[in-house]
Image: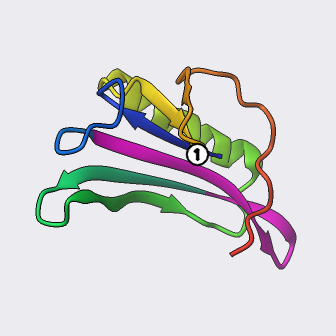
Amino acid sequence: MIETLYKTQTPEKEKSECYVLVLTSRAASGGKVYAFMEEHGQWHDDLQRFRYRVNAINTEEELTYQHARGMYERAKSNLVRKGFIHSFGSDGVRKDPYADQTSEPELATA
């Protein structure tokens, strides 16, 4: 699951700031475990594109779906309180930042 939160209603070149939240599963020696990552994106004039910096990453071997999902939801709630209320899924489609997404993410292959 990947979600991008903006303060602006749509991503705007030279203006927008965003946060990308990622919750995914990965293979591990004990089976399937989960990973959570938060990135902060800001427009970079020299590069003429967004530049992203990882704010948080958790890839512990014991990270369960429930724990990773809790991290994801806490991060999202904190960002919404800061005004990042315009949410887009990985397909670029606008969505409600509090939409119920109870399905488990698919296994990441990378």
**Residue 68: horizontal and vertical position, in percent?**
65, 48
Viewer-proximal residue among 33 and 7: 7
Viewer-proximal residue among 27 and 15: 15
Q: Residues within 10 Å of mark 1 (few under 14, many from 20)?
A: few
**Residue 74: horizontal and vertical position, in percent?**
51, 34
| Coloration of the structure image | rainbow
| Membership of 19 in magenta stretch | yes
| Residue at left offset 71%, top offset 30% | 101
**Residue 59: horizontal and vertical position, in percent?**
61, 66
Residue 14 located left or right of residue 54: left
| Membership of 100 in magenta stretch | no
Viewer-proximal residue among 45 and 32: 45
Q: What secondary structure is the magenta-colored segment mainly?
A: strand
| Residue at left offset 48%, top offset 29% | 87
Identify whether 7 is placed above or below 35: above
| Residue at left offset 56%, top offset 20% | 96
The residue carrying mark 1 is: 90
Viewer-proximal residue among 28 and 109: 109
Residue 106 located left or right of residue 13: right
Three-letter amino acid code at disc 1? Ser
**Residue stretch rendered in magenta on the structure:** 17-35
Residue 23 located left or right of residue 64: left
Residue 91 located left or right of residue 50: right
